Amino acid sequence: MKSLFVLIDCNNFYVSCERVFNPRLENKPAVVLSNNDGCVVARSNEAKALGIGMGVPVFQVEETLRKHHVAIYSSNYTLYADMSARVMRILAEFAPEMEVYSIDEAFLSLPALPERDLVDYGQQIRQQVKQWTGLPVSVGIASTKTLAKMANHIAKKSPKTHGVLDLTSSAYQQKALSITEVSKIWGVGSKTARKLNRAGIDTALDLREANEQWIRQKFGVNGVRTVYELRGESCYALEESPPAKKGITVSRSFGHRVQSLKELQEATAAYAARAGEKLRSQGLSAAGMTVFVMTNLFSEREPRYYNARSIQFPTATNDTPEFIRSALQAIELLYRPDCRFKKSGVMLTDLIPAEKAQRTFFDPINREKSQRLMKTLDSLNLRLSLNPLRWAAEGIDQPWRAKFNQRSLRYTTRWDELLEVS
DNA sequence: TCTGGGGTCCTAGGACCC
DNA sequence: TCTGGGGTCCTAGGACCC
């Protein structure tokens, strides 16, 4: 039987999370910033209306933010991740199959039963999520993921839809395609959109009717898939369990420019430790690691420098001391005293399930002992939720840590940060 | 008048997503 | 002075092989 895709997407997710705990923000312009309070990564509708773009550096819109008294928040990922989990638990009850697509989006898959009232179904989802979490969502329904995305996009923008759009009828589809610019199609980015526009293809409808050979030649197989999806032929299946990760990266910009080798090493050791935690939480080991450093690549005055070093481990490992040792060695080789560093990072690569890691005969590390130690540390850090256990190499004061000057409280995950009502 | 042909693997870079 | 972080997939080109 044919199935349908339902895309549920939280509206302005990070801002909406802040609003749940601060209702005074309702109907007011508000933004949430990236790490280091560097860029705008979420905007309320009111903030969008002020012309504040997605991803713009804060310093470029400072004037607007001040003039219109826009509420400004640093990212509070702990809060957003927890709110996301609550939303996903609710959505899971609405269909037999679900794909969690991102922190604020999920696809559901339904058998296409003619008697079902899909708009009513979408409204039930909206009401349930709103009532149980306080978060507003939009719902798009169609026969392919790309069309469901489009339906969701229109539902979000058009008040007439009341947040739900069902695009299963071809008359609605035609209309929706004709009002959607190619740049808004899922899978069409700015580069591709510009190329399409130059060829006179402006709307999703134009793209759906485009010559397949030409699309294949200019945009490859993914271009063709998008055209098929617009025609209602599904090329992207629901992925209930995400495929195994191919790499794990931890990288951060520093809170200030870092010039000393010691600080650069501390920060990178901390990233290596965090990468190790992530790796083990997914039951994986890594056979390779890449460490990179960079200065401010936007700067025109200072020397710009990016460099990376890759290491292969003799045997796949998930041992944090091993990661830290290798990271520190790499950093020493990458370091340049004449540079002011902005960012470093650690990528773990060539991942395999931990239990499949081959043992070598002359292994300098006692693997059983290391496994026990890692397990103990991870469970303590998880349970105590203050990450009290750190490696000495990460340093104590950590002056390089990114700044979050306007972070709200972690209302849902910390006893000492509960919402207070007076 | 004209360089042989075809396969595989790896890597860097580009484009996209949230 | 101030510009996030974490991913995936595809393609083209080079190296190498027979």
Image (cartoon, coloured by chain):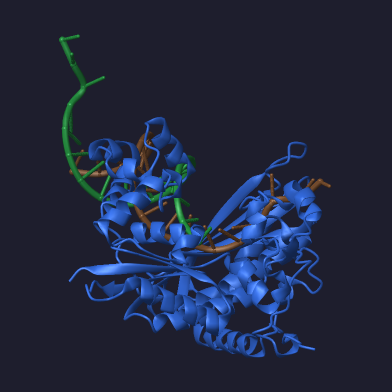
Chain colours: A blue, B green, C brown
Name which residue lies at 63% across and 62% down: A44
Residue A300, position as x, y percentages in the image: 74, 36
Check the picture and name the quadrant holding the N terminus of chain A: bottom left
Residue A410, position as x, y percentages in the image: 69, 80
| Image-based side of A35 in relation to A142, left or right | right
Name which residue lies at 35% across and 74% down: A240
Residue A32, position as x, y percentages in the image: 68, 63
Residue closest to the eye, A379 or A168: A168
Instruction: Classify residue A70 by image quadrant.
Output: bottom right
In this rendering, the answer to whether A387 lies above or below A303 is: below
Residue closest to the eye, A282 or A10: A10
Is residue A259 shown to the viewer in this render?
Answer: no
Name which residue lies at 41% across and 50% down: A185
Name which residue lies at 26% across and 59% down: A234
In this rendering, the answer to whether A375 lies above or below A334 is: below
Residue closest to the eye, A36 or A234: A234
Is residue A156 shown to the viewer in this render?
Answer: yes
| Image-based side of A407 in relation to A378, left or right | right
In this rendering, the answer to whether A384 lies above or below A176 is: below
Check the picture and name the quadrant holding the C terminus of chain A: bottom right
Could you tell me how many numbered marks the image carries? 0
Residue A304, position as x, y percentages in the image: 70, 41
